[in-house]
Amino acid sequence: METTSKQVKFKNNRYKFAFIIISSLLVCSAIASLDLVFHLSYVPKSAIKILLFTLPVLLYKLIFKNSYITHQLKNPNKRNLKVSALIAAGVSLVIIGAYLIFKDYISAENIRDNLAKRENIDASNFLYVALHIAFVNSLLEEIFFRAFIFYYLNKLNLRIFAYIYSSLLFSLYHVTTIAAWFDWWLNLIIIVALFVVGIIFDYLCEKSNSFLAPWFLHIVANLSINGIAWFSIL
């Protein structure tokens, strides 16, 4: 009887693993196609991303009867949420410092042209877009990459894989947006940096038992980046 129960659990875990991997790859591929194939501007692309990011999360809960995301909202480790706030201050300084180091290799004109042509973003609407990126888009990304991919893979006792896979996918997901902005070597540096950021976000999610801690850090990081863009690029 016990053996049968273990076999059922093992089989169920394989289905969960397959669902997470396949759905996450499909979602990231679909989002990449919005930039590379369909060249959608920011507003319609954002609407589609809301659907793409939330659909697998809802389907997973429906199919496997899991409520981990609800649990993360109700039972966060408050001490680690405070730690996240302290880290956020350091992250802002790192982002500003990185910009000062590499600013001579960043073409503000190229970024402005790409934002205007590909995303329909300019100085007149950038504030609204920046706030959406900082609060809404970051929330969607944290639910998808941390609360869904990392948290559920970790629950399947795949801790190391969960860290590597979710962080790698998180970094590569951003490539289609920024690839045309920078030289290839700077893109590589950014990809590696985003992978490290993903590891940090995963760690905060694990320690706080909630995606809220990395989400707060994500908000601060996005506000810092958008602030640099507002004052130095647009």
Image (tube, grey):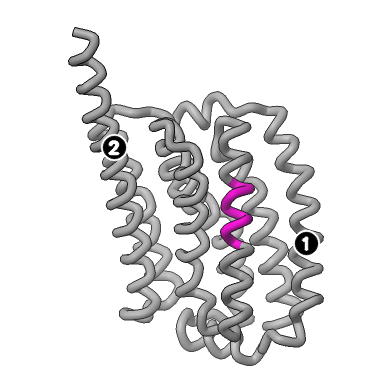
Q: Can residue 83 be seen in this snapshot?
A: yes
Image quarter of the C terminus: bottom right
Q: Is residue 195 magenta?
A: yes
Image quarter of the N terminus: top left
Relative to 201, 54 lies left or right: left
Q: Residue at x 26, y 18 (%)?
A: 6
Q: Which residue occupies the foreground of this view, 47 or 188? A: 188
Secondary structure mostly seen in magenta is: helix
Q: Is residue 58 magenta?
A: no
Q: How many marks?
A: 2
Question: Regarding mark 1 in the picture, which secondary structure is present there?
Answer: helix
Q: Which residue is mark 1?
A: 94
Disc 2 residue type (three-letter)? Lys
Q: Residue furthest front?
A: 3
Disc 1 residue type (three-letter)? Val
Identify the magenta region: 194-201
Q: Which residue is mark 2?
A: 16
Q: Position of residue 149 (x, y in %)?
A: 42, 45
Disc 1 or 2, which lies upstream in sequence? 2
Q: Residue at x 58, y 74 (%)?
A: 188
Q: Position of residue 95 (x, y in %)?
A: 74, 65
Q: Residue at x 75, y 55 (%)?
A: 91
Quarter of the rendering containing residue 230: bottom right
In the picture shown, does residue 60 fall above or below 5? below
In the picture shown, does residue 73 fall above or below 185? above
Relative to 48, 103 lies left or right: right
Q: Position of residue 8 (x, y in %)?
A: 20, 22
